[in-house]
């Protein structure tokens, strides 16, 4: 089955932080978020552009990590003749909607191209707290106790060895060794194992490009971006039909350093594109998983 997947540069739109930050739920690393979920993190507000778990929201110029920055001061009103792309947020008939994909002339209230999001309470602002009618007098301060002698400092423990971000590939199969062991224990289904293998090879190419600071042409950057985003698209489509499928992204980027490296790599790839627009072809996910990393 073929899926049409078009993602233009405007899906990378980010807005500055704003008064939204006081009333949305704080991001939780252990929680699963779906498209349209709203969180706060480090004094900024984000809306989830697609299914994500464990990926920290970052205020950058890409949405590949699953988060888009919001600003309550400038949510535009939906216009019939305007062109919208995935991640655009609009106001329509006192409600707020996020675009799932490219669309135009599609009413947000009754179109599959839009998803309603609960921004009303956030945009309304906080309720002022009621003052206590009879505040109790402050207690008299207690005298400070005599300071105890400081104990002898304990010797600092030996630092744990640093795990390299790219990792070792002793057998040269294109997969990081610990990731290869992990997916072998995680997936019994041969189709899911194949998806995890090809995903790991693609993620490895992205990290090698970033960590080794490889200089690539704009055309090579476009190809890498198409493969990276198409991989995520096909994984999400498979996960939609198979809810118990463990996303290989979570297994591959399994440390804080690797999660940060993923964001850095996405930013470096965005810079390598030099503002060029990307045209995404039709994707046959079955064929894509077979050949993307060959």
Image (tube, rainbow, N blue to C red):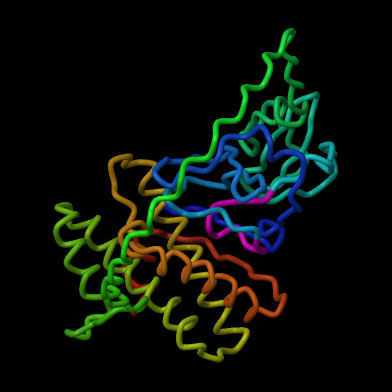
Is 90 positioned to the left or the right of 237 in the image?
Answer: right
How many discs mark residues in the rendered view? Answer: 0
Q: What is the quadrant of the C terminus in the image?
A: bottom left
**Residue at 27% from the left image edge and 71% from the top image edge:** 157
List x then y, in percent, for residue 209: 47, 83
Compared with 136, 258 (above or below) is below
Is 187 positioned to the left or the right of 212 in the image?
Answer: left
Compared with 179, 268 (above or below) is below
Q: Residue furthest top?
A: 133
**Residue at 71% from the left image edge and 55% from the top image edge:** 14
Compared with 120, 256 (above or below) is below
List x then y, in percent, for residue 64: 55, 60
**Residue at 42% from the left image edge and 56% from the top image edge:** 234
List x then y, in percent, for residue 49: 58, 47
List x then y, in percent, for residue 87: 66, 48
Main SS category, magenta section: loop
Residue 269 position by quadrant = bottom right
Is residue 11 covered in magenta?
Answer: no
Question: Foreground residue, 1 or 17?
Answer: 17
Question: Foreground residue, 177 or 6?
Answer: 177
Which residues lie in the magenta part?
Answer: 60-69
Residue 25 position by quadrant = top right
Compared with 283, 272 (above or below) is below
Is 233 positioned to the left or the right of 26 in the image?
Answer: left
**Residue at 70% from the left image edge and 76% from the top image edge:** 276
Question: Foreground residue, 107 or 116?
Answer: 116
Q: Residue furthest bottom?
A: 215
């Amino acid at each position: 089955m073929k899926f049409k997947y078009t993602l233009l540069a405007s899906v990378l739109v980010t807005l500055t932080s704003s008064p939204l930050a006081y009333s949305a739920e704080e991001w939780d690393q252990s929680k699963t978020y779906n498209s349209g979920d709203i969180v706060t993190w480090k004094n900024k507000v984000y809306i989830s552009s697609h299914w994500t778990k464990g990926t920290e929201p970052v205020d950058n110029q890409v949405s590949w990590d699953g988060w888009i920055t919001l600003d309550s001061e400038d949510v535009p009103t939906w216009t019939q003749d305007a062109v919208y792309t995935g991640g655009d947020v609009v106001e329509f008939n006192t409600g707020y909607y996020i675009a799932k994909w490219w669309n135009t002339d599609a009413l947000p209230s009754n179109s599959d191209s839009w998803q309603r999001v609960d921004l009303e309470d956030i945009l309304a602002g906080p309720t002022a707290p009621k003052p206590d009618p009879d505040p109790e007098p402050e207690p008299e301060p207690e005298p400070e106790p005599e300071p105890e002698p400081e104990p002898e400092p304990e010797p600092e423990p030996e630092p744990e060895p640093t795990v390299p971000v790219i990792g070792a590939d002793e057998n040269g199969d294109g997969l990081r060794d610990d990731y290869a062991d992990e997916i072998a224990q995680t997936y019994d289904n041969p189709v899911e194992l194949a998806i995890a293998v090809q995903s790991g090879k693609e993620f490895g190419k992205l990290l090698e490009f970033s960590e080794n600071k490889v200089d690539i042409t704009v055309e090579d950057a476009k190809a890498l971006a198409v493969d990276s985003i198409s991989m995520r698209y096909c994984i999400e489509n498979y996960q939609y039909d198979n809810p118990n499928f463990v996303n290989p992204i979570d297994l591959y980027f399994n440390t804080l350093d690797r999660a940060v490296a993923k964001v850095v790599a996405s930013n470096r790839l965005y810079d390598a594109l030099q503002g060029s627009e990307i045209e995404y072809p039709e994707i046959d996910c079955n064929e894509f998983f077979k050949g993307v990393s060959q």
